[in-house]
DNA sequence: CTGTTTGCAAACCTTTTGCAGAGCC
DNA sequence: GGCTCTGCAAAAGGTTTGCAAACAG
């Protein structure tokens, strides 16, 4: 427990930082630090995926069955976190938003139409260009989502082999 | 009415093409061509904006007050058009999708998280960069979709005024 | 004619809100 | 102790569905 370079401890350190940011935010706005708010932050932190309010609520009910956390509290806390820029949300399909901790890096996606595989990538030149365009339009850019659809290398081979 | 280079006639020609594509699609699937379906296609065509089902429905009621078009029909037709790739949709805020005709030129989107407004843009440098990255990964790029989320100029003003 | 489509209204689902009691500071 | 926060349930959106009558082919 003395190594500070392990993943475990990195994660712990990062989470402690996040939690203390959260507490500071609450204090600043005269809001109270409750077990529900902590559990929501922690569950978001421990998930690698974008979560819907519902899936987040389910996760919490699984992990903390004793604590009866209401879905309304999940919504209220997510709104609070989003307003404070601690989480970002993306709108997806027919209905619903998905949330993730804002601290995480964003990335773009290649999606293969044949096999459905997703390749993540980040291109600094595109990012830079996006910032520039947003700037020119006076748009305060917070997040972005980019998907490129096509056929991946492996599937192209499969097609040729036929 | 003989010039074929005016906007009006270009638009007419393009719309006729669209309409005949739509009719072909319907016929192919043993579906019927109804006045409601035509009115929905036409109204989408004549609008420059991304429309929610509700705003599309309102537009139709304004323009064709005699025809009592139900909101359910708007939803049903939009789903049909989307499945057939004649329109594309974008999800924006907490709830709701916005639709536009797919036939229009390719573009990317800024989406304001506060007011839901959508600003279209195209940046050749980004397009070029996408092609290059796809190439490096051996990915056969066919299509892409990009959304940048944030706060638009107008909503930033509103925030400051508070 | 026959089977599809429509408008209406009810049903659905996700998100928000009002309220009385519980909990933080 | 005062004020906020919570769970619950009801309300409020937006979207979908069931059905009888209208309509296209």
Image (spheres, coloured by chain):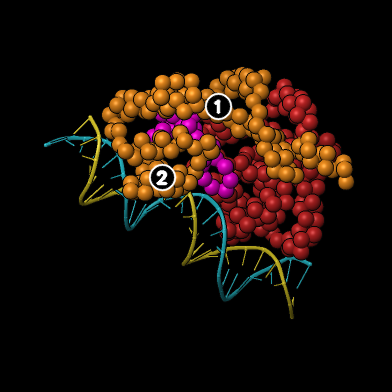
Chain colours: A orange, B red, C yellow, D cyan
Report whether residue B77 is seen. yes
Near-viewer residue (A46 or B123): A46
For label 1, the residue is: A105
Circle 1 sits in a helix, a strand or a loop, which is it? loop
Residue that label 2 marks: A63
Left of B70 or right of it: where is D11? Answer: left
Where is residue B134? Give x, y as percent. Answer: 75, 29
Q: Residues within 10 Å of mark 2 (few under 14, many from 20)?
A: few
Q: CA distance from mark 2 to mark 1?
A: 26 Å
The residue range painted magenta reads: A79-103
| Badge 2 element | helix
Q: Is C23 on the left-hand or right-hand side of B30? A: left
**Number of numbered callouts drawn:** 2
| Residue A55 on image: x %, y % | 48, 46
User: In the rendered structure, the residue with mark 1 lies on which chain?
Assistant: A
Front: mark 2 or 1: 2
User: Can residue B86 be found in the magenta stretch?
Assistant: no
- Nearer to us in this view, C25 or B146: C25
| Residue at (57, 42) in percent of width and height | A92
């Amino acid at each position: 427990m003395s190594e500070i370079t392990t993943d475990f401890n990195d994660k712990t350190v990062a989470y402690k930082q996040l939690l203390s940011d959260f507490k500071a935010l609450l204090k600043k706005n005269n809001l109270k630090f409750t077990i529900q708010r902590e559990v929501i932050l922690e569950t978001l932190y421990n998930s690698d995926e974008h979560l819907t309010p519902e899936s987040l609520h389910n996760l919490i009910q699984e992990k903390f069955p004793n604590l009866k956390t209401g879905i309304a509290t999940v919504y209220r806390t997510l709104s609070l976190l989003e307003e404070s820029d601690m989480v970002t949300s993306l709108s997806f399909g027919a209905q619903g938003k998905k949330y993730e901790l804002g601290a995480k890096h964003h990335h773009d996606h290649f999606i293969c139409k044949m096999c459905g595989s997703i390749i993540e990538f980040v291109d600094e030149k595109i990012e830079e260009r996006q910032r520039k365009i947003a700037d020119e339009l006076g748009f305060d850019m917070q997040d972005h989502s980019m998907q490129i659809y096509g056929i991946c290398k492996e599937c192209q081979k499969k097609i040729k082999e036929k």
